[in-house]
């Protein structure tokens, strides 16, 4: 399995934004040195108390120049909030700088707040996403093209540079709602999945639909699935449970509040989904979280945990959230990267 880390360049209470960048880059350097497979960058807007990662493509470029082996991915580039021609140019540039180590994670974002502030109706996000993706794919053919869409018009544009990887960097789509899974399978996209809004049986059923659509569309293989999940490695079982408690409680509490606050922003169906997820998260006990939402344990325990998840869900990769909730001490996050690389990854390579 591929093992990467999910990065938000968190802003710690009382710390400077300069410190958030310094900590983030130290994690990148540690991952490069220890042998982690990849770093996946969030896109976070207007949340200064949580993150400074509002321009992940810029950070990706910096990572590309300070590493030689680590893959760099977006998790995810929010296509409807950006000009697709600019996205095509910037992604191709980072792919060139990294000499083909870039992975293009794409999505719409599950929350409407950034859309509201940017003045883009969230109800338009699905159509805007499809248009943006169509334009990016045409741009990377390297020929003059025009496009007449509902939200975007392109007149005789030729994009440069083209990506280093041919025909383009690998795509990976975020799948967070039931209808997304078969669509991603039909289109032949690898996917990100998570356990924040779904339990394992629900996710397993959705993955069946993804793989069914993948096969019926005639794609080779059986799809490609990476699980984004909070990960904590303790030197003892007790430490693995107790040390991340405050941070993970903050994480799921915050997610529940975000779902509740966002309900009503994007239509009745989305409202019902968000209300259900908010209620589910607010009712979680810590035992429920440990059993169904996270991967906490000793390194040996996590080998067993990831093996179980791989077998049950058919995983191809894990994207570890090493500071879910934003309250894990920086030193512990660095230690977790080293333990993950030294004592867990060898069992899956």
Image (cartoon, rainbow, N blue to C red):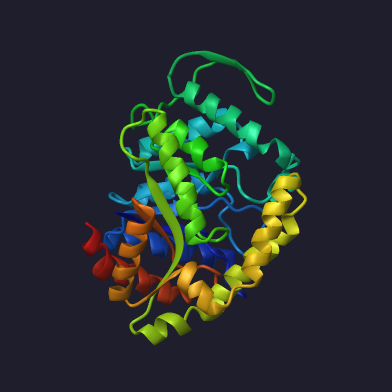
Q: Nearer the viewer, residue 67 or 190?
A: 190
Q: Please, is residue 15 above or below residue 113 in the view?
A: below
* 190 on left or right of 20: left
- Quadrant in the rendering for residue 97: top left
- Quadrant in the rendering for residue 123: top right
Q: Residue at x 63, y 66 (%)?
A: 280
Q: Nearer the viewer, residue 300 or 166?
A: 300
* 37 on left or right of 133: left
Q: Quadrant of the N terminus?
A: bottom left
- Quadrant in the rendering for residue 83: top right
* 340 on left or right of 110: left
Q: Quadrant of the C terminus?
A: bottom left
Q: Is residue 327 visible?
A: no
Q: Please, is residue 38 above or below residue 180 in the view?
A: below
Q: Residue at x 35, y 74 (%)?
A: 335
Residue 269, position as x, y percentages in the image: 71, 46
Residue 238, position as x, y percentages in the image: 40, 86
Q: Residue at x 41, y 76 (%)?
A: 332
Residue 312, position as x, y percentages in the image: 37, 58
Q: Residue at x 25, y 70 (%)?
A: 343
Residue 114, position as x, y percentages in the image: 69, 49
Q: Nearer the viewer, residue 320 or 204?
A: 204
Q: Please, is residue 281 above or below residue 126 in the view?
A: below
Counting every numbered tag in the picture gives: 0
Q: Nearer the viewer, residue 111 or 120?
A: 111
Q: Is residue 326 visible?
A: yes
* 201 on left or right of 37: right
């Amino acid at each position: 399995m591929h093992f990467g880390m999910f990065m938000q360049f968190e802003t710690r209470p009382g710390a400077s934004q300069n410190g958030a960048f310094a900590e983030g880059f130290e994690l990148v350097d540690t991952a490069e040195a220890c042998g982690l497979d990849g770093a996946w960058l969030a896109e976070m807007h207007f949340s200064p108390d949580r993150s400074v990662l509002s321009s992940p493509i810029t950070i990706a470029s910096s990572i590309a120049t300070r590493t030689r082996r680590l893959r760099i991915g977006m998790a995810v580039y929010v296509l409807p909030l950006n000009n697709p021609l600019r996205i095509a140019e910037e992604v191709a540039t980072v792919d060139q700088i990294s000499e083909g180590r870039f992975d293009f994670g794409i999505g719409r974002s599950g929350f409407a707040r950034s859309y509201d502030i940017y003045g883009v109706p969230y109800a338009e996000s699905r159509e805007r996403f499809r248009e943006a993706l169509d334009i990016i794919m045409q741009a990377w053919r390297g020929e003059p093209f025009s496009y007449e869409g509902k939200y975007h018009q392109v007149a005789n544009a030729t994009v440069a540079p083209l990506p280093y990887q041919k025909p383009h960097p690998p795509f990976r789509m975020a799948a967070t709602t039931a209808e997304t899974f078969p669509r991603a399978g039909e289109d032949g996209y690898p996917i990100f999945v998570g356990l924040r809004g779904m339990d394992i049986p629900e996710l397993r059923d959705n993955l069946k639909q993804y793989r069914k659509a993948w096969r019926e569309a005639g794609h080779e293989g059986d799809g490609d699935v990476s699980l984004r999940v909070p990960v904590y490695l303790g030197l003892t079982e007790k430490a693995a449970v107790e040390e991340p408690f405050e941070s993970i409680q903050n994480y799921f509490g915050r997610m529940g509040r975000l779902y509740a606050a966002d309900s009503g922003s994007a239509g009745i169906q989305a409202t019902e989904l968000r209300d259900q997820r908010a209620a589910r998260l607010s009712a979680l006990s810590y035992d429920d979280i440990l059993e169904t939402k996270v991967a906490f344990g000793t390194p040996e325990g996590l080998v067993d945990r990831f093996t179980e998840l791989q077998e049950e869900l058919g995983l191809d990769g894990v994207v570890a959230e090493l500071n879910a909730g934003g309250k894990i001490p920086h030193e512990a996050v660095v230690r977790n990267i080293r333990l993950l690389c030294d004592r867990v990854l060898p069992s899956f390579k």
